[in-house]
Structure formats: C-alpha cells, structure tokens
C-alpha cells in the first residue's frame, strides 16, 4: 500500500511539472506572437500571417526536443 501511495504521489508531481512546463512554453510563444503582431501591425498595418505563427511554434518545438 505504501509503495502504491509513493508511486501515485510521484506520478501526480510529474504531471504537475509537465503541465507547468507546457504552460511556460505556451506563454513564451504567445508573447512572441504578440510582439511580432505589434511590430508588423505598427510597421505595415497588416498584422502577421499563419506562417509567421507556425514558424514561432516550430522554433519552440525544436528547443523542447
């Protein structure tokens, strides 16, 4: 029984860390997209494209692997 509780506590802690790590990456991606949007919108008045967003996501995907 004690081993099962230790394993459950470990799994629960691992899940929390994983979700927090994902949230940190998503916050960074969001901040970079907002910064790019504000820059492009200010410079040429057209905003960003989906391809711009995909490039940012791919950049963070490469970092996390």
Image (cartoon, rainbow, N blue to C red):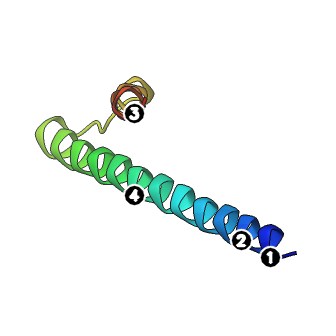
| Disc 3 target residue | 53
Is disc 3 surrounded by few (<14), some (14 to 19) or many (20+) residues within 10 Å?
A: some
| Disc 2 target residue | 6
Mark 3 vs mark 4: which is more N-terminal?
Answer: 4
Which label belongs to residue 2? 1
Mark 4 vs mark 1: which is more N-terminal?
Answer: 1
Q: Residue at x 30, y 54 (%)?
A: 31
Is disc 4 surrounded by few (<14), some (14 to 19) or many (20+) residues within 10 Å?
A: few
Q: Residue at x 40, y 23 (%)?
A: 51
Residue 55, image x, y percentages: 36, 25
Q: Is residue 26 above or below residue 16?
A: above
Q: CA distance from mark 3 to mark 4?
A: 17 Å
Assign a secondary structure to mark 1.
helix
Residue 41 image-quadrant placement? top left
| Disc 4 target residue | 24
- Image quarter where the C terminus lies is top left
Q: Is residue 41 left or right of residue 9?
A: left
Assign a secondary structure to mark 3.
helix
Label 2 with label 1: CB-CB less than 8 Å: yes
Q: Nearer the viewer, mark 3 or mark 1?
A: 1
């Amino acid at each position: 029984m004690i081993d099962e509780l230790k394993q459950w506590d470990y799994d629960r802690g691992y899940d929390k860390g994983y979700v927090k790590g994902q949230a940190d990456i998503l916050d960074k991606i969001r901040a970079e997209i907002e910064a790019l949007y504000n820059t492009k919108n200010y410079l040429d008045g057209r905003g960003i494209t989906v391809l711009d967003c995909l490039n940012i996501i791919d950049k963070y995907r490469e970092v996390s692997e």
